Image (spheres, rainbow, N blue to C red):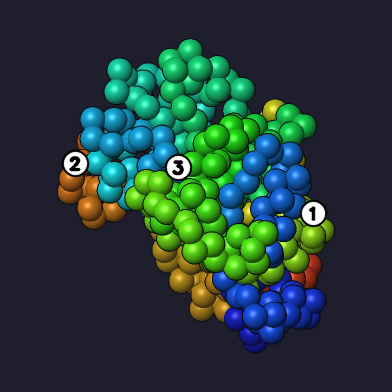
Amino acid sequence: MRKEFLPFSRPSITEADIAAVADVLRSGWITSGPQNAAFEEQFCRYVGSKSAVALSSATAGMHLALAAAGIGPGDEVITPSMTWVSTVNLITLCGARPVFADIERDTLMISARTVQDLISARTRLIIPVHFAGAPVDMHPLRRLAERHGIAIIEDAAHAAGSAYRGDLVGAHGTAIFSFHPIKNLTCAEGGMLCSDDPAFCERIRGLRFHGLGVDAYDRRQQGRSPQAEVQEPGFKYNLPDVLAALGLQQLHRLDVLNARRAQLAAFYHEQLADIDEIRPLAVPSYPHRHAWHLFVIRLDIERAGMDRDAFMQALKDRNIGTGIHFRAVHRQKYYRETLKPAPDHLPHTEWNSERICSLPLFPDMHAGDVTDVTAAIKDILAS
Ligand SMILES: *Cc1c(COP(=O)(O)O)cnc(C)c1O
């Protein structure tokens, strides 16, 4: 058994990352400023988008996007229930109704097929989630949305470096990335909204900082512009330079970090191939590049004779950490009580919600760590 606990995720931080942050701390300007501007420009260029706005989190980005799109009471927003709670919370908080689309059973992603019957006269927006580093099949979904005049905002929290049919996620449409510590690129907390609609990005940029016409940092004056006036009431969702400096460093290494994740995922696939009780997610059949944000498996609970939570506990007892991405949102207390979903609502979501488990996957892991995980799984299933 492992002597040291293996967490399911750990950020990859180098001495150069630490030095870049320390430089900002010594510089006399620690909140949003030149590092923030450089991070936006370089991230924008990396994904091939027209414009990008750095934010304090992806959740903040989704809040601003819903506000800028004017989503409110009477509106319906289609999104998966197999997602992080933040999206559904924000839809609810702005007074709109979340409408859950079921997922494809083996990729955990919504598709044109699972969305089409849910569109009503009230549908304003679709929020697909690129899952675990694989991209959603966007072309059919975009065609469906266009036909009905519905907007799409992509939740790209898992998709920094993912590509769909030759283009990076974020190159087309509007996508929101997260830089939370478990994500492929981290700056502790942060996010980026990329859009091919520069006017939409400018609106987000204004709402990000109190609705003032300018940023906290005026690029010419090298300081706060005292003349700024409120154009419309806004929020306080800017990304400080201390964090943007870390984001920039990580961006420069993103392809290397993702290549390492892909290698580790390949080790897992090899070593799990002959364990009948464990089913990794399927990889999409359309052309894509996977960012391997997560390595998600489904436990065959019938064959294993144990439920997923017992399986996770058994791994923890063997010093191996795991995560759940995600527990179906519509089965969580508030949504269960307010939306009262039928027992057989969203069958693929519920089937997966009870069986999924994310195994450790982060760039600083060694091949031996993967072997420790798969050996522990074999040990658990044999006992
Ligand atoms: C992490 C995550 C978010 C939220 O990102 P934050 O930066 O923590 O706000 C949103 N959606 C998904 C699918 C996520 O995994």
The residue that disc 2 covers is: 340
Does residue 123 appear to the left or right of 208 in the view shown?
Answer: left
Q: CA distance from mark 3 to mark 2?
A: 28 Å
- Give the x, y percent position of residue 140: 57, 20
Q: Secondary structure at mark 3?
A: helix
Q: CA distance from mark 2 to mark 1?
A: 43 Å
Camera-near label (3 vs 2) is: 3
Q: Amino acid at mark 2?
A: Lys
Q: Does the CB distance between marks 3 and 2 fall below 8 Å?
A: no
The residue that disc 3 covers is: 65
- Give the x, y percent position of residue 300: 50, 49
Foreground of the two, 39 or 251: 39
Give the answer, above or below, for where 83 lies relative to 226.
Answer: above
The residue that appears at 57% across and 79% down in the rendered structure is 319
Give the answer, above or below, for where 15 lies relative to 79.
Answer: below
Q: Secondary structure at mark 1?
A: helix
Q: Does the CB distance between marks 2 and 1 fall below 8 Å?
A: no
Q: Amino acid at mark 3?
A: Ala
Say if disc 3 is inside 8 Å of ligand 1.
Answer: no
The residue that disc 1 covers is: 255
Give the answer, above or below, for where 280 lies relative to 101.
Answer: below
Q: Amino acid at mark 1?
A: Asp
Q: Secondary structure at mark 2?
A: loop
Categorize mark 1 by other alpha carbons within 10 Å: few (<14), some (14-19), many (20+).
some
Give the answer, above or below, for where 235 lies relative to 105.
Answer: below
Categorize mark 3 by other alpha carbons within 10 Å: few (<14), some (14-19), many (20+).
many
Sequence-earlier tag: 2 or 1: 1
The residue that appears at 64% across and 85% down in the rendered structure is 4
